[in-house]
Image (spheres, rainbow, N blue to C red):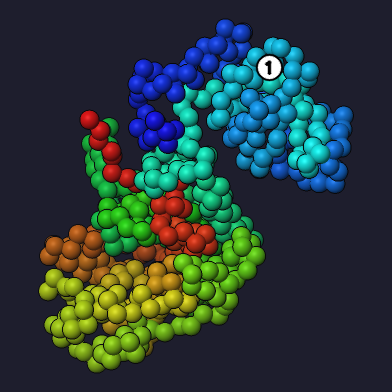
Amino acid sequence: MTAGCVVAEGPGMNDGDDPLRAVRVEKRDGLRALGVEPYPYSFERTCEAGELERRYAGLGAGAETEDRVRVAGRIRAMRNSGMFIDLHDASGKIQIFCHRDLLGPEGIGVVRLFDIGDLVGVEGLVRRTPRGELTVNAIRVTVLAKTLRPLPEKYHGLADVELRYRQRYLDLIMNPESRETLRRRSRVVAAMRRHLTERGYIEVETPMLHTIPGGASAKPFVTHHDALDIDLYLRIAPELHLKRLLVGGLADKLFEINRCFRNEGLSPRHNPEFTTLELYEAFVDYTAMMQLTEELIAVVAETVLGTLRIDYGGTAIDLSPPWPRRSMTELLHAAAGVDFRAIATAEEARQAAVGLGAALTGNESWGQAVEAAFAARVEDTLIQPIHVTGFPRDISPLAKADRNDPRLVERFETYIYGWEIANAFSELNDPQDQRERFEAQMRARAAGDEEAQPLDEDYVVALEYGLPPCGGLGIGIDRLVMLLTDSPSIRDVIAFPTLRPRHES
């Protein structure tokens, strides 16, 4: 039985089920027999491996020092019966030299109970071997966590993709690329937060449990609060609460990096739980949000990658602003030869959309037919960054009407590599218009549209106290990280993606 097979069997095995695990359990007990606690409380580390590499970069081959350091990490390789150990921490690798002359018989006895995967601490003297390997000569070793399960086989790694997602800890141990992807995600979020705060935005938090699901067109998850005896909905968007804060004058610029939940299918670009940046700025319209989108994504790319020219799936993408701005109907006309602006009725729009390959139910409005035709014929072709404007009014209940065409609204979505990356409006602040839009959504909901937005009476009341003219923007952080890490699936950039439970006999 290979180590990889052992890992794949998953948690819950007894010692007798797995001879390799039984050997490790015996070694754990052996440590305790020597008076060594295999799971101590702490270890005072003085250096990381990467720091040592930088500090001693000029140390010549064969040179020795009297510098004493304390390092800690996971054993990833052992040679010559444990004389040489590769110790990995979050910053890199350091070689450990274990010899009886330095450790004595008691220390060597502990080393003999080490296994690949164990977490250990080492105190020793820094040198560079004649072959040029930076090394710590161990004078004291400490077991920090004795592992009872072997890591996947070294050269094949963790090849089972689903197992990588289910046991992410193993994926991170074995695959440096996975660690770098999630670290880069952290840097993306930090760069966004830093740039917005430098521009005068304040960060806020809004509820994740809503009494009314709103702020986006999506099917929510439902839960129940026992003490209040009411159903609550996991947040599908923070929009309506953020705009309430704008009404209250908390700030003229505010943002939230938020977790959202939508009861929808899974795909390489969709996870039911995802992260977005959502922000609002008073006294500007959606054109300011276009500039901010370009600026923000460019700053993040420069900060994290050091370039605005990225490669995704073998395709070169240039993030350099400014980005083109073209309307949805204009793009449709250019791609398919159909001018939806000249189509007056919903029935004619549905017929035209079906003729372009859109899958419809037969009850779509003019705007829904336009959106479906756009998805069928245009979306996948938008590889380089572009702002798509001119969205239909009947699919945009929270955006102000277009100043020149009442069937449209002042809204754009930013596309890169055929994906929607950002969505922004000139925010609707007329309470009467907003109520009428909500009522139209309620009629659509009654007709069977599960994603139509319900009427939020308190939000309309808030608008009656005055929402300043403002622009709002949402950016999908997961998809942006996919682009900036060349990751083919959203599961690669979410530490713990949603998975179907695995049922085993």
Determine whether, in the image, residue 416 is placed left or right of residue 433: right
The residue under the point 23% across, 61% down is: 451
Q: Which residue is mark 1?
A: 108
486 or 410: nearer the eye?
A: 486
Within-10-Å neighbours for mark 1: few <14, some 14–19, many 20+: some
Which x, y percent locates residue 212? 28, 52
Q: Position of residue 201 (x, y in %)?
A: 57, 60
Q: Place residue 124 in its image quadrant.
A: top right
Tell me how many marks there are: 1
| Above/below status of 128 relative to 26 | below
Seen in the picture, residue 220 relative to 107 is either above or below; the reply is below
Q: Is residue 432 visible?
A: no
Q: Which element carries disc 1, helix, strand or loop?
A: helix
Q: Nearer the viewer, residue 439 or 387?
A: 387
Q: Amino acid under label 1?
A: Ile
Give left or right: position of 426 versus 264.
Answer: right
Front residue of this view, candidates 205 and 252: 205
- Which residue is rendered at x = 44% and y = 50% of the image? 494
The answer to which of 168 and 362 lies nearer the viewer is 168
Quadrant in the picture for the C terminus? top left
Query: Which part of the image, by quadrant, shows the N terminus?
Result: top left
Q: Is residue 449 visible?
A: yes
Q: With 484 as the anchor, is 99 left or right in this view?
A: right
| Residue at horizontal 45 percent and vertical 43 percent from the top | 158
Query: How far across and how far down the image is residue 215, in percent?
Result: 34, 60
Query: In which image quadrant can residue 100 be found?
Result: top right
